[in-house]
Amino acid sequence: MPDMTGKVVLITGASRGIGEAAARLFAAKGAKVMLLARSGTRIAEIAGEIGENALAMPCDVSRYWEVEAAVTACVSEFGRLDVVINNAGVIDPIGHMAQADPENWAKAIDINLKGVMWGMRAALPVMLDQGGGTVITTSSGAAYGPQEGWSAYCSSKAGALMLTRCLDFENRDKGIRALGLSPGTVATQMQREIKASGVNRISQLDWSDHIPPEWAAEALVWLCTPAADPHLGQDISLRDADIRAQIGLT
Ligand code: NJP
């Protein structure tokens, strides 16, 4: 079982789903956790339940200055920053490109793509000063191929994967571990929104097809261990039976 004692982990999109499960699991493994999301009351409740090793700060990842302020607060409170989980994400807007509302479409890019870059940009100076750190981005199968109605989501996730690759390319030799997690389909609010849309084959999946968010959290913890080093600069996929076995998910 990976031990995260003494590590400081900042998690975006920690108000529910994969991010909430990750905050609880990293803390259970001994880490100090900083929870970020726009729903300030909810993350404060979760941090309160976790206890003294958790802090919450409202943050919209599409605003660089809010992400930078959160990293500064994390370092000032916990003294360092070992892991960033760029997990915040949205599926909206779902719809065909011919009818896309330009502002809504751009908002998804602001969150899913620019938000990932802001997490990397804000954390890197701290991590480089410390001599290293791990940056994990919650990726998606959508980074690799189109899905009907998901042009914003697919293109933002493809871009975020390229950010992981660029981060690794520029910084691996400086101790930065850049990785992505493609979780498969997970039983969270995002899948409820996908189901409600009725668009594309993923909306037709049965709820029992989805993995629990706790599995994705286990994978995020595993990605912080040297066992994941062969995957630096890439995504791992929880659809891969060999990866699941290595993590201990059955
Ligand atoms: O979704 P959900 P998941 N600034 O909707 C936050 C990827 N993924 O846990 O701000 C800051 O329960 C939002 O908080 P709030 C997916 O693309 C999923 O499934 O309070 N935070 C909430 O905490 C995403 O990257 C599946 O609304 C913002 C969280 O994001 C990650 O997994 C499959 C924000 C979303 O929680 C977590 O998604 C896959 C902002 N501007 C990849 N906007 C899947 N579920 O099947 C949103 O391949 N958030």
Image (cartoon, rainbow, N blue to C red):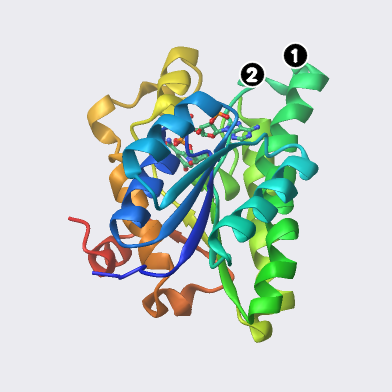
Residue 229 horizontal/vertical position (percent)? 46, 78
Answer above or below: position of 6 versus 158. Answer: below
Residue at numbered disc 2: 95
Residue 133, quarter of picture: bottom right
Furthest residue in direction left, as rendered = 250
Residue at numbered disc 1: 99
Amino acid at circle 1: Gln
Amino acid at circle 2: Gly
Residue in the foreground of this view, choosing between 69 and 85: 69
Q: What is the secondary structure assignment of the residue under circle 2?
A: loop
Disc 2 packing (10 Å; few <14; some 14–19; many ≥20): some
Q: Quadrant of the C terminus?
A: bottom left
Q: Quadrant of the N terminus?
A: bottom left
Disc 1 packing (10 Å; few <14; some 14–19; many ≥20): few
User: Which residue lies at the image location 33% right of the left edge and 27% below the top edge?
Assistant: 205
Can the viewer see residue 247 in this picture? yes
Q: For disc 2, does the CB lie below 8 Å from ligand 1?
A: no
Q: Is residue 78 left or right of residue 208?
A: right
As measured in the structure, the alpha-carbon distance from the residue carrying label 2 to the one carrying label 1 is 7 Å
Residue 128 horizontal/vertical position (percent)? 70, 76
Residue 55 horizontal/vertical position (percent)? 49, 45
